[in-house]
Amino acid sequence: MNSMNQWHVYILRCADESLYTGLSNDVARRLDEHNNNDRLAAKYTRVRRPVQLVYQETYDSRSDAAVREAEIKKLNRQSKEKLVLGKI
């Protein structure tokens, strides 16, 4: 499958140590936007730069990725940290 047809759920660690969860079909581009583009970066990450990619999962459809993104966003911080460390 073409990698541009795949969707990724990702977690960024911000400069203030907070975690941001998002989804994209091009994580490298999106990471660059979060760090360098005031227009395209998420409002949350614009004021917490630099951000670093710490976790990602790959899905074959945007809808599957969006469901997983919503699940991750509902996790508490401790559970997100365990996910990032590969412990859940």
Image: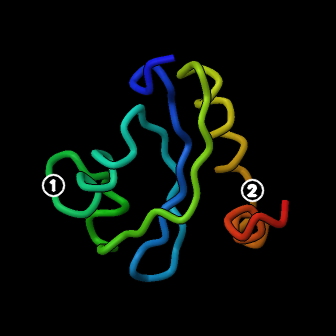
Q: Identify the amino acid type marked 1.
A: Asn
In the image, residue 80 above or below residue 29: below
Find residue 56 and report its horizontal and vertical position in percent: 57, 50
Question: What residue did someone put label 2 on?
Answer: 75
* Left or right for 45, reference 72: left
In the image, residue 60 above or below residue 22: above
* Marker disc for residue 37: 1
Which residue shows up at 49% across the image and 46% down it? Answer: 22
Find residue 76 and report its horizontal and vertical position in percent: 74, 64
Which residue shows up at 17% across the image and 61% down it? Answer: 36
First of labels 1, 2 by sequence position: 1
Q: Identify the amino acid type marked 2.
A: Leu
Which residue shows up at 44% across the image and 27% down it? Answer: 3
Secondary structure of residue under mark 2: loop
Which one is in front, 23 or 76? Answer: 23
- Residue 52, by quadrant, is bottom left
Which one is in front, 29 or 22? Answer: 29
- Residue 87, by quadrant, is bottom right
Disc 2 crowd, CA 10 A, few/some/many (<14, 14-19, 20+): few
Which residue shows up at 48% across the image and 39% down it? Answer: 23
